[in-house]
Image: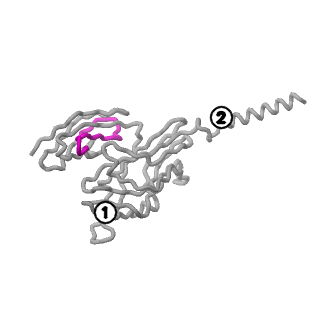
């Protein structure tokens, strides 16, 4: 009888230990998803303020079961996120699996654009209700951090209404590109002279995949979130006294920064 009770206790302990080791609630069986945001700049504005209430991901085909990554409920000036700068929108541990979409829930109000020192409210046509959905197909694995980089293109997201409306002159129609940061690299360099006030673009097969404004004091620039391949770096000076320039065949390697050195612009 004693041995039967002992055997029963041992079996129960084994079941408990097995459940504790294999359950999805332990750190060892969970993965991490981090969401960062950067910006493709807009030349005509001093600030683009966007209010993000919530960040969610989904791992179900029927678009149900959205999982909240973070609820920042915060205003972000997109023009602070240029030249390689990013901000973390949220990070969370998730069960392993493929997460097909990410969704940004925008506030119903509070968005604005500042032009020539004057602030204008921006209305979101529908994003505040349903959220801005992006396909990501993120493969979350145990003990691995998966980072999504959201490139919020301010230049294409701020749209003038074209109407003589003193209340709403601009709409916020978010144009965002999502990439897996782990499979991207960067291009860096310097444009001279700084007086040219250049905008720098990374172009592949006639598509502009990243852009930034070179630092106005040093001329330094950095283009991030680029997949491996060959790019043309196009430099467009905002000062009409200088000519545009381009550098062809710039290679990008995963998890590396290719510094192309100093690009000198000629005067007209």
| Residue at the spot 33% in from the left edge and 49% down from the top edge | 80
Residue 117 located left or right of residue 31: left
Alpha-carbon distance for marks 2 and 1? 56 Å
The residue that mark 1 highlights is 119
The residue that mark 2 highlights is 21
Magenta segment boundaries in residue numbering? 214-233
Residue 22 located left or right of residue 106: right
Q: Quadrant of the N terminus?
A: top right
| Residue at the spot 65% in from the left edge and 34% down from the top edge | 21
Which is more foreground, mark 2 or mark 1? 1
50 shown above or below 216: below
Question: Residue 148 falls in which quadrant of the image?
Answer: top left
Whole-percent x, y for residue 2 in the image: 89, 29
Tell which of 133 and 34 is nearer to you.
34
Contact? badges 2 and 1 (CB < 8 Å):
no
Q: Secondary structure at mark 1?
A: strand
Whole-percent x, y for residue 26 in the image: 61, 38
């Amino acid at each position: 009888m004693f041995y039967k009770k002992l055997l029963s206790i041992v079996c129960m302990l084994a079941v408990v230990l097995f459940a504790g080791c294999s359950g999805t609630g332990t750190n060892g069986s969970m993965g991490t998803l981090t969401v960062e945001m950067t910006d493709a700049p807009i030349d005509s504005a001093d600030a683009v303020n966007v209010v993000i209430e919530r960040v969610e991901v989904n791992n179900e085909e029927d678009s149900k079961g959205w999982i909240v990554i973070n609820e920042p409920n915060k205003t972000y000036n997109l023009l602070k996120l240029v030249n390689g700068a990013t901000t973390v929108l949220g990070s969370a541990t998730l069960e392993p699996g493929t997460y097909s979409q990410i969704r940004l829930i925008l506030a119903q109000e509070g968005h604005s654009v500042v032009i020539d020192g004057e602030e204008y409210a921006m209305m979101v046509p529908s994003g505040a209700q349903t959220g801005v959905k992006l396909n990501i197909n993120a493969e979350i694995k145990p003990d691995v951090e998966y980072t999504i980089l959201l490139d919020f293109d301010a230049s294409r997201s701020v749209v003038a209404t074209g109407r003589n409306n003193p209340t709403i002159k601009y709409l916020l129609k978010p144009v965002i590109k999502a990439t897996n940061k782990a499979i991207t690299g960067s291009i860096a360099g310097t444009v001279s002279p700084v007086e040219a006030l250049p905008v720098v673009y990374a172009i592949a097969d006639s598509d502009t995949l990243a852009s930034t404004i070179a630092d106005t004091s040093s001329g330094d620039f950095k283009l991030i979130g680029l997949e491996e391949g060959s790019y043309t770096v196009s430099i467009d000076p905002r000062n009409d006294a200088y000519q545009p320039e381009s550098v062809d065949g710039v290679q990008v390697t995963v998890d590396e920064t290719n510094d192309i050195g100093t690009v000198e612009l000629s005067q007209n």
